[in-house]
Amino acid sequence: MSTTEARIWTVDDIRALGAVTDLPTAAAVLGIGRSTAYALAAAGDFPVPVLRVGRRYRVAVVHLLAIVDPTGTGDLTTPRSGASIDTTRDPHRTPVRRHG
């Protein structure tokens, strides 16, 4: 039994995931355990559509938003509240690439 506290996901946290996320993250957003999530996905019973890519499962974030925020637009391009532009950053600096 885990003694870690469950994370509370906000709409902004979910939007920050990008366009797609992995199955364990989608399960955490929905409050589903990892093992149960894989069993549901394999049976085709996961609460949102799941895409199988090779041996991995991927979930479109827009489907998670539709469940978590049904009155929202589900649009990932809508600016988040409090968003701002960092004017102190050097625009000529090469951006750091992150792979997720």
Image (tube, rainbow, N blue to C red):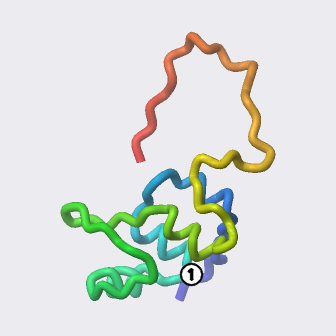
The residue at 78%/49% (across/down) is: 81
The residue at 38%/74% (across/down) is: 49
Q: Position of residue 82 (x, y in %)?
A: 80, 45
Q: Is residue 12 left or right of residue 67?
A: right
**Residue in front for this viewpoint, 96 or 10:** 10
Q: Position of residue 94 (x, y in %)?
A: 50, 17
Which residue lies most toward the left here? 54
Disc 1 residue crowd, few under 14, some 14–19, many 20+, Cα 10 Å: some
The residue at 74%/19% (across/down) is: 88
**Residue in front for this viewpoint, 98 or 82:** 82
Place residue 89 in its image quadrant. Answer: top right
* Residue occupied by mark 1: 31
Q: Position of residue 70 (x, y in %)?
A: 64, 74
Q: Identify which amino acid the numbered label 1 is placed on.
A: Gly
Q: Position of residue 10 (x, y in %)?
A: 69, 65
Above/below status of 85 relative to 27: above
Q: Secondary structure at mark 1?
A: loop
Q: Is residue 82 left or right of residue 16?
A: right
Q: Is residue 49 left or right of residue 61?
A: left
Q: Is residue 82 left or right of residue 75?
A: right
The residue at 58%/76% (across/down) is: 67
Above/below status of 100 relative to 63: above
